[in-house]
Image: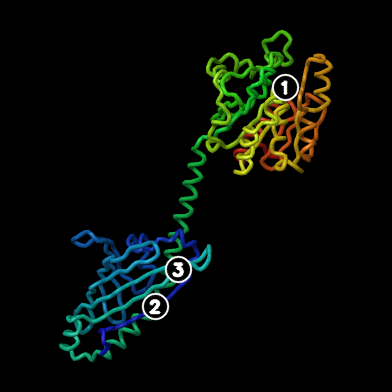
Amino acid sequence: MSPDNTLSLSTVTATIHAPIEKVDIADWVLHLPDGEYQRCSTAHIAAGATTTDDGRPMSINVETIGDAFVVQHYVAEVQEPHFCRMVSISDSISPAGRTKLRVVWEISVNKIDDQTCEYTNHIHSTAIDQTLAFFNEHNIPFARAQAARQQASHAHNQEETPKFAKSIEQKALRQNRAQTAANSIALEEKKMKVLFIISSSETAFWLSEVTHPYWHLTEREVEVDFASPNGGKVVFDPYSDPHFERSLEPNDLVSKGFLSDKKTIAKLETTLKLKDVDLSEYDAIHVAGGRGATFDLFPNEDVAKALEYFWSKDKVVGAICHGAVALGNIPDRIKGRQVTGFTLEGDRQLQAMFGSGFIIPHYPQTVLEGTGAVYTSIQPYTPKVVVDGKLITGQDQSAASEYALALLHLMTGHSPVTVV
């Protein structure tokens, strides 16, 4: 007789093709559906879950092992995602009659690599006093009972273990897919946010380079905040005001709509101070242009930090017109990148038009080319947008709408345009 009254001892392993982080064998074994249990072995009859009188979780399994009909009353002594110890005083009904024995079922998983793990099904059954009394009453030698139980139990284990592993694998992958889907839905439901950087300079920003991106984004439920180096009020160039008698954009209905709304006008009175903004709240950054950008957005340490943050987090970085000069704050990031911005030709035309007092301290084209970026342009005031990875630039205000929509598509990873 075995010194510890062991009747059988069997350990079988199988591979689970799922990341171990997604596997929870405690959840699996304590919520195993009856039908799934039956599919894991031809000898499985039924399964259910309950608790002990003191509230400990239990798994009730009904099966045949050899010539015995067995009811397992597994109490979860240890229930961890990667290890469970279940102990049962089981009912065993054989042709000789009914008795009880103790069964310890230990299941565990160990990581093989990032996508697979090893499942171990360990079963140890022992005779208790009632079992020994039964053997004695029916003249059953312990050695004979032990040999029969060992053979039957190991054969049963070899059949169920790979099927248990597959069941655990399928549940892990289902939950993984469900979590992925839930995360995707949450991301879709979470409103995206964009931070606009606008010049604080009295030489002003260009209105349409704020209003057009603002409209195209907000009408699609993207939240937009305005920030400037100094915070507070920012002013727009009167020549960009469609109501100004000498406006260069008198037909800009978008800017007219923006200026007619008290709430949007108020946003220009209360911009955030850039250095105080929590950049982690935003999905993209947009730098508006206008001549003021050449005064206070380059060189600028706070602008540099903001642009570097978005770049390092693989978020969208955008700039248009004279606002492209701000990219000169991160020369190592844009070196070799395709960019555009307000042309040197356009700046010369403006200086010729407005005279010697029309100062532009930093020409965007000159600054961009000086960083080693690959600058390209077309005829001034002709829409041009350049996208290089998650960097997007617009040549001048004529591209404000095209730039805004391209920015949106870059943020969402989706364009409604199909080219056939």
Mark closer to the observer (3, 1)? 1
Quadrant for the C terminus, please.
top right
Instruction: Compare residues 399 and 278 and report the one nearer the observer.
Output: 278
Does 154 sit left or right of 324 as displayed? left
The quadrant in which residue 273 appears is: top right
Mark 2 / mark 3, whichever is N-terminal: 2
Name the residue carrying label 1. Answer: 291
Circle 3 residues within 10 Å: few <14, some 14–19, many ≥20: some
Residue 110's tag is 3
Q: Label 2 is placed on what type of residue?
A: Thr
The quadrant in which residue 214 appears is: top right
Circle 2 residues within 10 Å: few <14, some 14–19, many ≥20: some
Please report the residue visible at 36 percent of the width from the left and 78 percent of the height from the top: 156
Q: Is residue 272 above or below residue 257?
A: below
Residue 11's tag is 2
Image coordinates of residue 103 in percent, x first then y, are 28, 75
Q: Is residue 420 visible?
A: no
Mark closer to the observer (2, 3)? 3
The quadrant in which residue 10 appears is: bottom left
Please report the residue visible at 80 percent of the width from the left and 36 percent of the height from the top: 369
Does 83 sit left or right of 4 as displayed? right
Residue 130's tag is none
